[in-house]
Structures are given as C-alpha cells and as structure tokens.
Image (cartoon, grey):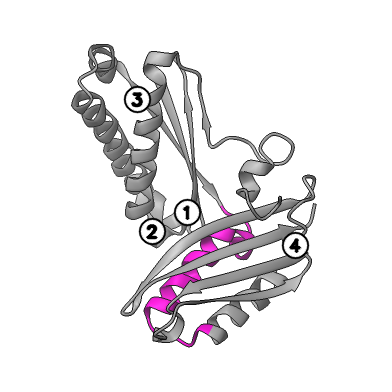
Amino acid sequence: MGQKINPRGFRLGPVFTWSSRWFANKKRYKKLLLMDVKLREELFLDLRSAGLARVDIERSINKVKVTVHVARPGVVIGRGGSGMEELKRFVESFLSRLETDMEARESQHEAGRLKVELAVEPVKAPNLNAYLVATSICDQLARRLPHKRVAHQAVDRVMAAGAKGVRVALAGRIAGAEIARREKYQAGTVPLSTIREEIDFAAVPALTKSGYIGVKVWICRKS
C-alpha cells in the first residue's frame, strides 16, 4: 500500500500538515483551490533560481498569507528588501487578476481590499528536501550528464546530510535509449508503510533531447 499513494498525503495530520490552510463554502472552494494551484505554478517558475521548495498559503476573511520556503533566501529578499516588495506586488496583482478573470462578483469586491502578507523561510537542510534533490537531478540530466553518476552523487549527498534512507527512481528513455526503462538507486531504509516515519517525496520530470525522464525521490528523515 505504501507505494501506491503519495507518501506525504499518506501522512497528512500525524507527520505533515496541509500546504493550503483555509475554509470555504461549496461555491467558493473550487475558485480558491484553482487560485492556489495557479499561484504555486507561477511562484515555482519565478523563484526557481532561489531554490523554492514549498509554498504555504493561509487565508482569512480579507488577508492571504503566503510563506515561501527557499534554499537561498537572499535571492528572494534582495538588496535592502527590494526583492520582497517586488514579489509582494507580483502576488497581489496576480491574485487580483485571477479573481477578475473568474468573473466572480464577490471576488472582484474582495480584490480591492485583499491584503497579502509575504514571509520567507529558509530551508535548513536542502539535501534533505526531496523536491530540491529531484530538481537538482533533473537539471543535471537536462545537461546530459551520466545518469548513474548523477543518481549516486545525489544519494551520497542525502545520506551525508543525515538521512536514514533515500531512494531515487528514474523512468523513461534514460541516456537516450530506444526503449524506455526504469532504474532505482537506494541507500539506507525507506519504510513507506510506516506512518510515523517522516518520508519526504517529490516527482519532477526532466526534459532531455530524447524526451521526458521521470525523477522520483523518497527521503526518510530522522525523527
């Protein structure tokens, strides 16, 4: 069962918390959910150079708090906090534009008085974050580096950072092969069925000249 469900979703509540924390009625729920999804897509594209790992969104009646977890917070903050102000204006304009596009009268009224609060949290151990590790592997595969060396180096870095175990899975036309295949690289223990274990998971596609290669990373952190 542990391999047929997202490990983070499997542990929501006991180990992990929700990345979107708000309540809405049946009419508003789908609109707010779509806004969260689109905002995350834009932020992951815009803050890729800063090593964005996760975006938390909290909503109240007339305020939205966006917390970005990045590996390099200095890139986001900028000189004298100029980067924070620019990012805050971008989030405000993006949310207002989304609300207008959805043609929701109640949202349009709220767009003018919607307050956005932005916070930046550093990722203390980037090598123990599955998304950052998977993104690093994808970037190297896109540069056509040997996949075995890339995977083994990623596994070694994660274990050196203090993880209990790590698993890396590559799937697709690896190294430009004619026939797609799947390869796994693992070190330590990764008990996917144990709910109390803190297992971080990420799946990121790597676009190579031969096509997409799927990269999945499981990291079992020490509790």
Residue 129 part of the magenta-drawn span? yes
Residue at image position (63%, 36%) is 17
Magenta span main SS: helix
Q: What's the distance in space between the residues labelled 1 and 2, CA to CA?
A: 12 Å
Q: Which residue is mark 2?
A: 48
Label 3: state its secondary structure.
helix
Query: What amino acid type should be assigned to the residue bearing mark 1?
Result: Pro
Residue 119, compared with residue 112, is above or below; it is: below
Displayed quadrant of residue 40: top left
Q: What's the distance in space between the residues labelled 1 and 4, CA to CA?
A: 30 Å
The residue segment tinted magenta is: 123-147
- Look at the numbered discs 2 and 3 and tell me whether their residues touch, using CB distance below 8 Å: no
Residue 143, compared with residue 111, is above or below; it is: below
Task: Measuring from the top left, give residue 202's x and y in whole percent.
Answer: 55, 57
- Look at the numbered discs 2 and 4 and tell me whether their residues touch, using CB distance below 8 Å: no
Label of residue 190 in the image: 4
